[in-house]
Image (cartoon, helix red, strand yellow):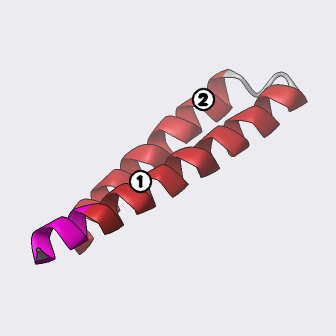
Amino acid sequence: YNYVFLNIYNSLLFVWFIFYKTLNNHLLVIFFNIFLFNFLFFYVIIYLVLFQFYILL
């Protein structure tokens, strides 16, 4: 479970890093990318918690 979580987290960081490097010419885009990354991370945490409950059931 922890290994899968770290894999998803690293992939999200990598995707966000690519977005940041390719679109860092505009401050608004940077803020949008940070917001989008936080939203995706929040969604992944919710998904993993629900998945853990599903395994326990």
Eyeballing the image, is 23 above or below 32?
above
Element type where label 1 sits in the image: helix
- Measure the alpha-carbon separation of dots 2 and 1: 18 Å
Q: Mark 2 or mark 1, which has the lower sequence index?
A: 2
Dominant SS type (magenta): helix
| Residue 3 point in image, percent of width and height | 22, 68
Element type where label 2 sits in the image: helix
Give the residue number, with chain letter if any, for mark 2: 19
Eyeballing the image, is 56 above or below 6?
below
**Region of the chain picked out in magenta, as a range:** 51-56
Give, as a three-letter code, the residue at label 2: Phe
The image quarter containing residue 16 is top right
| Residue 44 point in image, percent of width and height | 41, 53
Q: Residue at x 38, y 46 (%)?
A: 11
Eyeballing the image, is 38 above or below 24?
below
- Horizontal side of 47 relative to 22 (left or right) equals left
Q: Residue at x 43, y 61 (%)?
A: 45
